[in-house]
């Protein structure tokens, strides 16, 4: 991907029916359980909508991202990178000029919180795949 606007985040993106099925809840019908699932799905869709309101082309998160929010972002053309290590996102934020966000209530600040790079690509180093960012704020020629 070229000319990237990068959002770096540390936020849970793993709400879905798997977690709901892992909890113990007393409900009076299957419909009530379906309503719980639907509410969690809607909550995640709203969170993704807030994230997308910043206008990122790349979303990098410190935590796991489940399939549903990843698909919502992919449908809007946003590249998703999940489960980055904490030191890695600190360095990534510093080199791209991004802020590490955990809440998404101020999209008018997008120019101040999004990082930038000219190119993101996947590369092989030996048997390992790495994600290479080129043309960041603190790049040297």
Image (cartoon, rainbow, N blue to C red):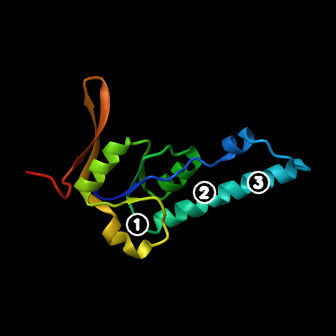
Task: Tell me the distance, in whole angstroms, between the alpha carbons under discs 3 and 2.
Answer: 13 Å
Between 98 and 48, the one nearer to me in the picture: 98
Provide the residue designation for mark 2: 44
Percent across and percent down for residue 67 are 56, 44
Identify the residue at horizontal 43%, vertical 47% (top origin): 62
Q: Residue furthest bottom?
A: 108
Residue contact at pointers 3 and 1, CB within 8 angstroms: no
* Position of residue 105 measured from the top left corner of the image (x, y, whole percent): 49, 70
Mark 3 lies on residue: 36
Q: Secondary structure at mark 2?
A: helix
Residue at image location 90% in from the left, 49% down from the top: 29
Q: Tell me whether the residue at label 2 lies in contact with that at label 1, contact meaning CB atoms closer than 8 angstroms.
A: no
Residue lying at the far right of the rendered structure: 28
Q: Quadrant of residue 126?
A: top left
Q: Tell me the mark number nearer the camera, choosing from 2 and 1.
A: 2
Going from N to C along the chain, the mark reached first, 3 or 2, is: 3
Mark 1 = which residue?
55
Give the secondary structure at mark 3.
helix
What is the CA distance from the residue labelled 3 to the residue labelled 1? 30 Å
Q: Earlier in the sequence, mark 2 or mark 1?
A: 2
Q: Residue at x 47, y 69 (%)?
A: 53
Q: Closer to the N terminus: mark 3 or mark 1? A: 3
C-alpha distance separating marks 2 and 1: 18 Å
Q: Residue at x 60, y 59 (%)?
A: 45
Quadrant housing residue 47? bottom right
Residue 63 appears left or right of 42: left
* Neighbourhood count class around disc 2 (C-alpha, 10 Å): few under 14, some 14–19, many 20 upward: many
Residue 117: percent from left, percent from top: 24, 56
- Farthest residue to the left: give it: 141
Q: How many marks?
A: 3
Q: Nearer the viewer, mark 3 or mark 1?
A: 3
């Amino acid at each position: 991907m070229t000319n990237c606007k990068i959002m770096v985040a540390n936020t849970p993106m793993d709400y879905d029916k798997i977690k709901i099925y892992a909890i113990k809840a007393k409900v009076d019908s299957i419909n009530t359980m379906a309503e719980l699932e639907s509410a969690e799905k809607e909550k995640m869709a709203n969170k993704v909508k807030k994230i997308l309101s910043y206008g990122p082309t790349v979303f990098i998160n410190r935590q796991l991202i489940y399939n549903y929010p990843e698909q919502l972002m992919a449908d809007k053309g946003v590249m998703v990178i999940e489960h980055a290590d904490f030191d890695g996102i600190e360095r990534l934020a510093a080199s791209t000029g991004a802020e590490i966000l955990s809440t998404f209530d101020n999209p008018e600040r997008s120019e101040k919180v999004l990082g930038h790079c000219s190119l993101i690509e996947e590369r092989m180093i030996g048997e390992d795949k790495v994600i290479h960012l080129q043309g960041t704020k603190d790049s040297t020629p």
